Image: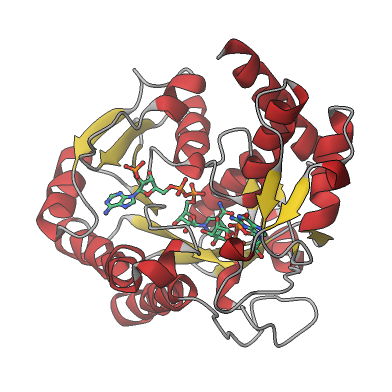
Amino acid sequence: MTKSALITGVTGQDGAYLAKLLLEKGYRVFGLIARRGTDTLWRLRELGIEQQVELINGDLTDVSSLIRAMETSQASEVYNLGAQSFVATSWEQPLLTAQVTGVSVTNVLEAIRIVNPTARFYQASTSEMFGLIQAEKQDEKTTFHPRSPYGVAKLYGHWMTINYRESFNIHASSGILFNHESPLRGIEFVTRKVTDAAARIKLGKQKELRLGNIDAKRDWGFAGDYVDAMWLMLQQEQPDDYVIATGRTTTVRDMCRIAFSHVGLNYEDHLLIDPKFFRPAEVEVLLGNPAKAHEKMGWEAKTSLETLIIMMADADMRRVEKE
Ligand code: NDP
Ligand code: GDR
């Protein structure tokens, strides 16, 4: 029988890649779509799957719509990727972030409990929960210390996932994913902001790039590799929590260097530091240890940062050229 999956956040970066992966595996893919004033389907269109994903209207903050989505989709796997996911915005809208990124996890878990408690659940947790890091390399046992309202909201969702597993025996897993990027990354995130700027400056459409803390270090991987890990988690006999990362960390500065040199520019000629982009509390460095995911699920990151940034810069060159 054909399996059905429900993805919240299907219009986001990960939602699009995961939908494609599940369609390739023969799933019927349902996606929760929130009402917006503008078109949000561009990523599904870029991957050529807009017609294949079955969209269900709903919002993470409206549990009745989630119950309906569970009933309509008859999903046996639910991937909760929807969130207010931009860290900087979480200081400007902390309560919205708490509702959408935090409390809504319980809405989804409740919809599962009410409609089909045998459905398997994936929660999109994050390395932002480590925040002010308590170990040089972070793994599943590292103590959390979130540094933003976003990180705090995600930590609530992480613990509710574990709590529903322990309380109701729901097959609920939490993927603690480190930063992952792609040509489908939102323009507000630093990698895409940089590759887009490199393309625009190269093509004479922009002069400078303004960034905040370029000494911050991140463990960056490719979103296409990371959605494999989400699926693998729900295929395990037992639900569990997994760190998903590359095990390498790089400064924003060096990531800029890679992007600009790929298009034949020197980033130092164009970069300006703008305090507007500094955060009230910064996560200075993140570095994940994905050993458990490798040992238990055979997962590992396949794409280097250089390959990833070049893929993104090339995609942005093509986009900007077409404008
Ligand atoms: P995006 O910001 O690209 O996508 C977020 C998705 O959530 C969009 O589809 C958005 O819909 C949807 N959404 C927002 N608010 C609501 C709402 N109220 N009701 C229903 N849907 C809503 O995120 P990513 O794809 O990058 O990330 C996916 C998940 O993984 C997120 O939860 C993120 O926090 C988490 N994560 C991401 C990491 C990364 O590096 N990318 C790392 C670790 C965790 P719309 O398009 O309509 O706005
Ligand atoms: P992050 O990603 O906050 O790690 O969250 P982002 O790309 O926004 O920032 C990474 C680092 O770059 C520094 N930075 C800037 N960031 C942005 N966006 N814009 C700038 O101009 C800029 N200048 C410097 C930031 O200060 C930060 O240190 C992402 C999101 O996808 C979350 O949803 C996810 O949970 C985490 O990754 C893991």
The answer to whether residue 137 is left or right of residue 104 is right
Residue 159 lies left or right of residue 185; in this view the side is: left
Q: In this view, does 12 lie above or below 25?
A: below
* Residue 200 drawn above or below residue 56: above
Q: Which residue is drawn at 69% across and 83% down?
A: 133
Query: Does residue 82 appear to the left or right of 131 in the view shown?
Result: left
x, y percentage for residue 92? 38, 68
Q: Where is residue 79 in the image (x, y as percent from the top left)?
A: 40, 51
In the displayed structure, 18 sits above or below 104; it is above
- Quadrant of the rendered image containing residue 141: bottom right
Q: Quadrant of the N terminus?
A: top left
Q: Which residue is drawn at 15% across and 57% down?
A: 62
Looking at the image, which residue is at 31% across and 38% down? 31
Residue 87 percent across, percent down from the top left:
50, 64
Lateral position of residue 123 relative to residue 180, left or right = left
Q: Can residue 314 be seen in this view?
A: yes
In front: 23, or 275?
275
Q: Residue at 63% of width from left, 43% of height from top?
A: 193
